[in-house]
Amino acid sequence: MMEFIRKRSSNVKNDVLSGLTVALALVPEAVAFAFVAGVDPLVGLYAAFMIGLITSIFGGRPGMISGATGALAVVMVTLVARGNAMGAEGDELGLYYLFMTVILMGVIQVLAGVFKLGKFVRLIPHPVMMGFVNGLAIVIFLSQLSMFMTSENGEMVWMQGTSLWTMIGLVGLTIAIMFGLPQITKKLPEALVAILVVSAIVIFGDLDVATVGSFIRDGGGEGLKGGLPLPQWAIFEKIPLNFETLKFIGPYALILAAIGLIESLMTLNLIDELTETRGNSNKECIAQGGANIVTGLFGGMGGCAMIGQSIINIKGGGRGRLSGIVAALALLAFILFASGLIEQVPIAALVGVMFMVVIGTFAWSSFRIINKIPKTDVFVLILVSSMTVFFDLAIAVISGVIVSALVFSWENAKRIRARKRIKEDGTKVYEIWGPLFFGSIKTFNDKFDVKNDPQSVEIDFVESRVSDHSAIEAISNLVNKYKEDGKTIHLKHLSEDCKILLYKSSPLFKDVIIEAIDDPRYHLAENPEAFTEGLSEYKL
């Protein structure tokens, strides 16, 4: 009992400290993504708080952090701009269209969870997963490079001279602390310690460096301080609930819902691997959707799982729901009570933390295995990584899955075989080997010589699996060709579902399909339980 309490209390400490670290890292990310989307920083911060809190409590993956993300922000910027153009200057219709879109996005995600579509994430191949991780690591790295820029005369330019070297030095110190502290003790969260140490050096050393506060003001914001998020009932007053509105926001909501679910479910898979536990993908879909509905109603920009902050949380020891709850509540506390202190945190410390996230996220093993896996998998890995960087996460993952599926279909299409033999009565037997589906139909048809075959032909499917409607259609066409040529044809060992469909398509198949089977191989294939029972009896 005492051991159980000790472990629980230790995990609470790790969850709390890790949650505080994540909250600090969430601030510049949420603000930056709000600027990308073209909305006020508080819209991004409120989204990070509400989505983080709701998904931490109700989500299917304890320890995973959700909030406003760049993948969604790049889609939202066009929506906000087009929405603003629909109203008079100062109406901010784009912001209200954004809230309405986020609500519809949440509804779509809830429906995806209700209909259990989350399980389809299992169809994502491992090369696609590695490409997603590598691409996202590169995106996180590139996003941090903008922090090495400063505002001059209203334009962003690269730092130079002392300011640049100071920034590099503080980033390097953060990385050194995060790398070295675990070598000394693992009882302290290295990311939080690094942020506190570097912040103390900047504050007490009175160093002139970029801070969270200066970052917000340079982007056009007024500061971090704000109140509690309130219901935005003005959405329903300013945006007409009609077909025209649905036609405008529908495509954006669908794209945002797809991107959000893909990023969330793939991050869930990654956290599963890191923690050697298993999350609930359908539950996560519903939680993400519910969080976005609430966020849209209370003036947030929507969001999904954040791989960077999730990695920070897991590496910091955050494993339970408490870590996400603490991160969300701490972020709200920053907004309400501690905005002055948080605005003094140097950007360099947070950049150093994110660089360590990049190092921990990138699948370095991909370089080691690149010569050991099929070239098609290497192509998919590089394709997904590149498309994640240059295009969009959803496009990258979907493209990778499509290419992998096409490669799989092509490889299986080449496996169809036909062994031919002549029985004593002169009947020619075609024994089909391999999967029969849309990809292998052409090769399957090429195996037969209708004109030169004898009067009696038999096709044996015991070593083949008829997989789809294309295969059934091919069998039907082949039978018709033999019949038109005045020859007798019989089919053996067809699967039950295939026979049912063929019987429905034409009553002629009653005379073509052989039902009486005396081949023990067929019975074992049709009834695997019998094989298992027989095997157990043999062992006994």
Image (cartoon, rainbow, N blue to C red):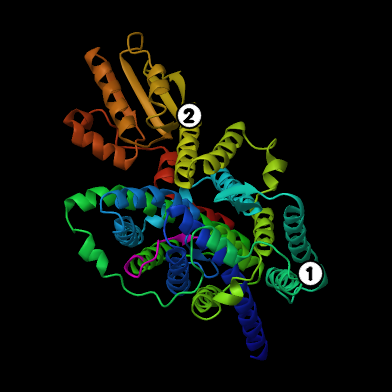
Q: Residues within 10 Å of mark 1 (few under 14, many from 20)?
A: some
Look at the numbered disc 2 and give the secondary structure of its residue.
helix
Q: Residue 451 at what x, y percent from top left?
A: 32, 9
Residue that badge 1 annotates: 181
Above-or-below relation of 26 to 518: below
Q: Residue 95 at what x, y percent from top left?
A: 34, 59
Q: Nearer the viewer, residue 499 or 35?
A: 35
The single residue placed furthest to the front in the displayed view is 153
Q: Nearer the viewer, residue 215 or 311?
A: 215
Look at the numbered disc 1 and give the secondary structure of its residue.
helix
The quadrant in which residue 242 appears is: bottom left
Task: Left or right? Give the position of 358 relative to 400.
Answer: right
Task: Left or right? Give the position of 54 relative to 319.
Answer: left
Q: CA distance from mark 2 to mark 1?
A: 51 Å
Q: Quadrant of the N terminus?
A: bottom right
Q: Nearer the viewer, residue 30 or 106?
A: 30
The amino acid pointed to by label 2 is Trp
Q: Residue 203 at what x, y percent from top left?
A: 71, 73
Task: Left or right? Give the position of 107 relative to 334.
Answer: left
Q: Residues within 10 Å of mark 2 (few under 14, many from 20)?
A: few
Q: Residue 371 at what x, y percent from top left?
A: 70, 35
The amino acid pointed to by label 1 is Leu
Query: What segment carries the magenta color?
Result: 296-305
Q: Nearer the viewer, residue 128 or 540?
A: 128
Q: Quadrant of the C terminus?
A: bottom right
Q: Magenta span has 43?
A: no
Residue that badge 2 annotates: 410
Q: Magenta span has 300?
A: yes
* Mark before the other along the chain sequence, 2 or 1: 1
Q: Residue at 39% of width from left, 74% of height from top? A: 229
